[in-house]
Image: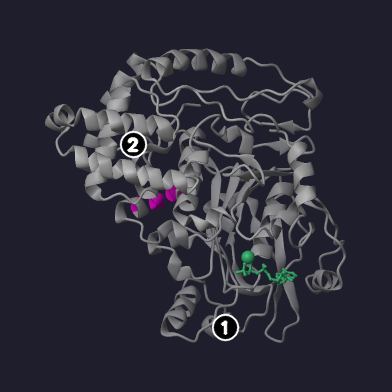
Amino acid sequence: MADDTSIFIGASRKPDDSYQRPEQLLLQYGNRHGLVTGATGTGKTVTLQILAEGFSNAGVPVFCADIKGDLSGIAMIGTAQDFLVKRAEQVKLDPYDFQEFPVIFWDLFGEQGHPIRATVSEMGPLLLSRLMNLTEAQEGIMNIAFRLADEEGLLLLDMKDLQALLANIAERADEIGSRYGNVTKPSVGAIQRTLLVLEQQGAANFFGEPALRISDIMRTTRDGRGAISVLAADKLMMNPRLYATFLLWLMSELFEVLPEVGDPDKPKLVFFFDEAHLLFDEAPKVLIDRVEQVVRLIRSKGVGVYFVTQNPLDIPEKVLAQLGNRVQHALRAYTPREQQAVRTAAETFRPNPDFDCATTITQLATGEALVSTLEAKGVPSMVQRTLIRPPSSRLGPITPAERQKLIAESPVIGQYDEVIDRESAFEMLQKKAKEAQDAEQQAQQAGTGGSRWTIPGFGNDDPPQSGGRRAPAPRPSNRQTVAEAAIKSVVRSVGSSVGRAIVRGILGSLSRGR
Ligand SMILES: Nc1ncnc2c1ncn2[C@@H]1O[C@H](COP(=O)(O)OP(=O)(O)OP(=O)(O)O)[C@@H](O)[C@H]1O
Ligand SMILES: [Mg+2]
């Protein structure tokens, strides 16, 4: 049923509820993004699960956040529960095979997976300001701080570095203010206090080294399946702004790091953005515009972004318009806003003369959805009322013991688990930057091995696990060399003056090169 070119989603139904035909997502259009919506308990997570399974089996790595912990079961083999077997029969999924998937667990707090970190410099002033909910004036100071750090060759790795830099700026407020304007001691002090709050909320874990290597979420297994990176997000959801900023950072990193590929046969990576409304809640227009831009442009890097959210109205119209593959689960329509959501959802589909979309959306059963995917020439298919297939992996969460076992067997074990704490003294940082550069070069020259995991296109396979663990090299951060910095600042001013690409990435994060 599923072949090399598509993912089987489920079976559409005729108006009399009888079987109509299989519904698929064409891998060729997997990078044209997607949307999974529906009220709570209608089947969104299971849909995400079967899509992730399908991409993995097609050799496409997947990154997804696990909001409630119930997606973690994708790492374990499923069992033939009656209602699942019945569903498999209804959608003519034959044979209904069970399977476990190659999962790498990640956790910003390092508890339920490998820690994910980024350096302050990579995050950049725009996203940091969003994370800290800074005012426009404060954001201005943050921009100046990053500019100073670039100009003076200061590495910004963790929160301590940023604090030190801000303290330094506060001390030199008069001098810096006269150069750049609008920098006063009290205004810098306000940012320092916000930073403290952020640290207390646990965000300090996230900033530092070793920072995530994008190639580690682009792995495939030797049997050709894409790794599924599952980010534990239950605790993270308590700090929605950190969650949203982190995922935005990851998306912009992907955008910066990956080469253009045009329209590949299948995506290079698929990124599921659960609770996507958090991205846009209270986001300033400039950020929404940038997100819209990244979503539009990342397609040609072969990355498909799938937003998962309860209400399609959560997604700004310009972003919504770019989401080609759609699975709409049931919505309620009691309040005027809910009715509006139903109308919006219905209107975005190519109508099917067999049924009224708006009415049907309110009548869909659990695990049933209106589905429209891109077909030949990238045109949306006529919307179909579709029963979604059951997963091959376990429905529901993994146990803590199972999780720990999988973490211990992970291909990145030992690489991120310990913090590398480089001193924040500026001279020290500069000296270390040189060492880091050398180390990175060495790492790039490392040979290939015979483990289960490989990183296609990145030229460095892992050594066999028994052959020792290798930590990723610390990389040079916000400044590589004086010459490069000079070039960057020229490009930056040229870039901004003609409104084109800026070196400090599209979301303000700093690309660290390929
Ligand atoms: N495709 C399906 N096949 C079989 N059962 C399904 C399917 N989709 C959903 N279900 C059943 O419905 C339950 C709820 O689905 P799911 O957890 O995906 O809902 P949800 O929309 O993610 O809810 P929430 O918003 O609360 O996270 C599942 O635990 C499962 O029992
Ligand atoms: Mg769910």
Q: Is residue 295 magenta?
A: yes
What is the magenta range? 289-297
Quadrant of the image occupied by residue 157: top left
Q: Quadrant of ligand 1?
A: bottom right
Q: Quick check: can you spot residue 16? A: yes
Tell me where residue 74 appears, x and y as whole percent.
Answer: 74, 54
**Other-residue count near label 1 (Cα within 10 Å), few / some / many at <14 / 14–19 / ≥20:** some
Tell me where residue 39 appears, x and y as whole percent.
Answer: 57, 74
Tell me where residue 141 appears, x and y as whole percent.
Answer: 24, 39
Residue closest to the eye, 90 or 239: 239
Going 47% across and 80% down the picture, which residue do you hit? 338
Going 36% across and 34% down the picture, which residue do you hit? 163
Q: Quick check: can you spot residue 61? A: no
Which secondary structure, mark 1? helix
Q: Which mark is residue 501?
A: 2
Residue closest to the eye, 250 or 239: 239
Name the residue tied to disc 1: 362
Q: Is residue 265 magenta?
A: no
Q: Quadrant of the N terminus?
A: bottom right
Tell me where residue 264 appears, x and y as whole percent.
Answer: 58, 42
Q: Is mark 1 within 8 Å of ligand 1?
A: no
- Relative placement, left or right, of 168 versus 131 is left
